[in-house]
Image (cartoon, coloured by chain):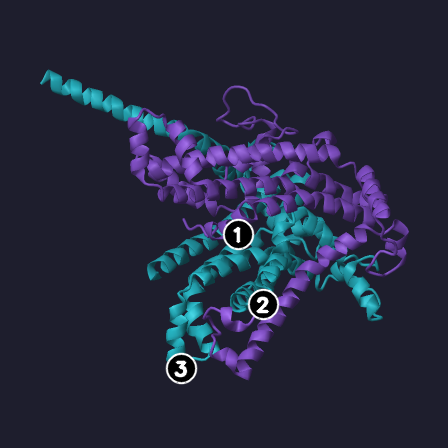
Amino acid sequence: MKANTKISREKRKQKLKRYLGAWILLLPAVIVLYLMIWRPSFMGIVWSFFKMKGYTPTEFVGLDNYIQVITNSDFGRVMWNTVQYVFWSFLIGFLPPLLLAFMLNEIVHFRTTLRTAIYLPAILPGVSILLLWYFIYFPNETGMLNMLLAKFGVDPYVWLNDSRFTIIFIVIEMTWQGFAATMFLYYASIQGIDTTLYEAATLDGANPFQRFIHVALPQMSGLVVLNVVRQMIGVFQVLQQPMVMTGGGPNGASTSVGYQMYQYGFVQGRVGQALALGTIVFAILIVATCFYFYLNKKVEENQ
Amino acid sequence: MKRFSGKQPGILNQIDLKSFKGKLLYWIFFGVLVIAALCTVLPAVWMVLSAFKSTQEMYSSAAFLPKEFSPSYAWERITVAWKDLALGRSMINTFIVSLGNVVASVFVCGLAGFILSKFRVPGTKLIFVMVVWTMMMPAIIRTVPTYMSYISFPFVIDDKLSIGTNYNILDTYWPIWLTAGANSFEIILFKNNFDAIPTSLVESAKLDGCSNFKIFYKIMLPIAMPVVVYVAIGALSVAWSDYFTPYLVLKDAAKMTTPARLFMLKDSSAASIPTNVYMMGLIFASIPSLLIFCLFQKHIVGGISLGAVKG
């Protein structure tokens, strides 16, 4: 009896030691995630109900910050702009990576050369690309696009300063910057498709278009849908493009929610309102994220 | 020119390529890809050509090619830009930042991935679920709250949870390194790859008296080298491409990283820094990333499929 408890105590001690040894190595990640992600995300919501003095929360003021954010005349336009970013980036950015990935898989001539050339935007650092495009769209003849126009005898165009199309031009830059990474994600998946499936379809009399629709696409659809939803969530948070290329202008035409939050929090000293706007964005995106996980589950079930 | 004989069956196959319609489709695909490649390469070529123009030329002529192009003249353009932009200091800073990023990513995320993969210990399951959710947490909403905590790190003043001393870590590299360590995506990437390593290997090493950290360092990391390299490259590249965090947290110009410095120079560029010099700056800033790519091309291409992480 005594020996028995001694053994079990010894066992317990050993077990605890094993647990401790694991927890200690997990601890750095937990601490860093807590300090950099979990806590700021949570406290951002809590502090959005506080009055701010500089960057210090002072007193609880209820919904004051929210009322100020929503009644601000810019609020509606900023939200609408953000929706436009998401819409155009879907419209412009959805097909090119998918179709190009398939085409790259089909060709045999200069495949490596083309692959490397198309991958270039994914190699260049983000900051260089943003600043480069700022100069590509430059409204006088030092800009690349105006140089091209001049070759055809067309007068310089103002590009980003044309408030009707600013967001579309920014989305074109985003597509240029991001499509290569997406394309190669798809490309890797296409190469994993069993080629005997194509042959079987050919024997059944399917033409190339039918092979694309009925053989290749179904294998990819899960990955593509998930990727598109993830990208839309990402684009909703767009900040760096307007910050570098337009400063939110002209006249606020390209100000996204993210950039507005940056303005509130770091330029205009309206920290409480930045937090309130952040919480509103969070509420919207959490719905989108739940939808993403729901899709993810569906896709996994189908595989 | 290569014949079609090397063609694997795909949407198009050998039989299709014998007909006119199939050949036409093939060459349409090829043409579209060439156009796409031109679209990606042209801006970069324009950047290089503009960088080698003289300032006067940049503003007066709309020609793509620089008028003069000799090695000595090109070298002059390079040295002038290097002196005007004063990027040297910032490049050393970026190098230091990038090394810290690598250590943070590989050790913090790697260790977490190791524990989550190989230890069935109470609590790890909960942590794993939280990490998966963290991956989808919108990053943008954290910018202001994290900035608040940098001023009095780790806990904001007047915060009821505040204990002990708080430090102002603005103007240090800690915010950048901590951000690199707090990467749930990389934790899951490590976990998924460690899952493929047999647990018996860990068990037998443990019987030989290896400590957990030693198992991680001597066994797991070397076996999972492709993913380690992939994560390390990512951590290096972030330092050379992200201007936003350094721009926010570093106020001292002597501590600036290259991307942040280039961004700050933009506003003054209209007044004092001519576009051609600026373009040379963009090339300088791109060289480290291009070098990383050339050196580790195999790992990056192999890593693309690694990147397809699911929770």
> Where A274 falls versus B111 (above or below)?
below
Q: What color does chain B have in the rendering?
A: purple
Q: For mark 2, name the chain.
A: A
- Nearer the observer, A261 or A135: A135
Dividing the picture into quarters, in which one does residue A156 lie? bottom right
Say whether marks 2 and 3 touch (CB < 8 Å): no
The structure residue drawn at horizontal position 76% and vertical position 52%, both measured from the top left corner, is B48
Judged from the image, the secondary structure of the residue bearing numbered disc 2 is: loop
Is residue B176 something that shows in the picture? yes
* Residue B307 falls left or right of residue A259: left
Image location of residue B284, percent across then percent down? 73, 43
Image location of residue B273, percent across then percent down? 83, 44
The quarter in which the N terminus of chain A is drawn is: top left
- Nearer the observer, B107 or A235: B107
Q: Which residue is mark 1?
A: B301
- Nearer the observer, B113 or A44: B113
Say whether marks 1 and 2 touch (CB < 8 Å): no
* Residue B248 falls left or right of residue A284: right
The structure residue drawn at horizontal position 86% and vertical position 54%, both measured from the top left corner, is B58
Residue under disc 1 on the same chain as residue under disc 2: no
Q: Which residue is mark 3?
A: A205
Judged from the image, the secondary structure of the residue bearing numbered disc 3 is: loop
* Residue type for callout 3: Gly
Q: Which residue is mark 2?
A: A109
- Nearer the observer, B21 or A31: B21
**Residue at the left extreme of this rendering:** A1
Q: For mark 1, name the chain.
A: B
Residue under disc 2 on the same chain as residue under disc 3: yes
Dividing the picture into quarters, in which one does residue A152 lie? bottom right
Q: What color does chain A have in the rendering?
A: cyan
The numbered disc on residue A22 is none
